[in-house]
Amino acid sequence: MVSENEFLLHSLIMGIFINIVYDVLRIIRRVIPHSALMVSVEDFGFWVYCGAEVFLLMYRESNGTLRWFAVIGAMAGMFLYRKLVSPFFVRYVSLVLGALAEGVVKAVSRLCRPFRKVCCRVSRRARRRVGRGRRALKRRLTFFLKELKINMKT
């Protein structure tokens, strides 16, 4: 068991760490658009992870007992980080990563430009073949159903 001052410091750091992890999720969501379902799954995983981390902190440092000054310390760490660092961190890191991602997409599209005509021709041919195969399958199934009806009547 550690002293109360160390435990308070560790809980303050834990609050800051939890907010950093959530800010990383927010940055990823700004750079790569997510559906509402994916956001919910990410949030659920985040809260399970944070709950486990807080439990381990309490288990290691206070033998599993809940100390309210540790909760207040974690909240203070979250509050300080959220007010002082988070707005700038999320805004500027997401701007930089968004610009990098946009540059990568442009470079890949330029590299793929010569192959675009070939791919379009191949996809047109493939669609024609699929259409022909679908029509042939439909004819065969219709013929099979007609034969089955004839055989059922006799």
Image (cartoon, rainbow, N blue to C red):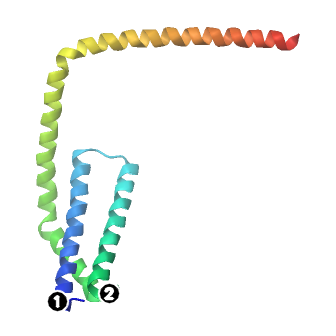
Q: Nearer the viewer, residue 113 or 84?
A: 113
Instruction: Give the percent coordinates (x, y) of residue 153.
Output: 87, 12
Which residue lies at the image location 42% right of the left edge and 13% below the top edge? 127
Q: Amino acid at mark 1?
A: Asn
Looking at the rendered structure, the kind of residue marked 2 is: Asn
Q: Residue at x 28, y 44 (%)?
A: 33
**Which quadrant would residue 118 be assigned to in this image?**
top left
Gap in angstroms between the C-alphas marked 2 and 1: 16 Å
Q: Secondary structure at mark 1?
A: helix
For label 1, the crowd category at 10 Å Cα-Cα, with few meaning under 14, some 14 to 19 and many 20 or more, is: few
Q: Residue at x 14, y 54 (%)?
A: 91
Horizontal placement of 106 versus 48: left or right? left
Rendered image: mark on residue 34? none
Q: Which residue is mark 2?
A: 63
Quadrant of residue 90 in the image? bottom left
Tell me where residue 114 appears, x and y as whole percent: 17, 15
Kindly state the secondary structure of the residue where label 2 is placed.
loop
Q: Which residue is mark 1?
A: 5
State which mark lies toward you, 2 or 1: 2
- In this view of the protein, which residue sits in the foreground, 127 or 85? 127
Quadrant for the C terminus, please: top right
Q: Quadrant of residue 109?
A: top left
Placement of the N terminus among the 4 image quadrants: bottom left
Residue 18, position as x, y percentages in the image = 24, 68
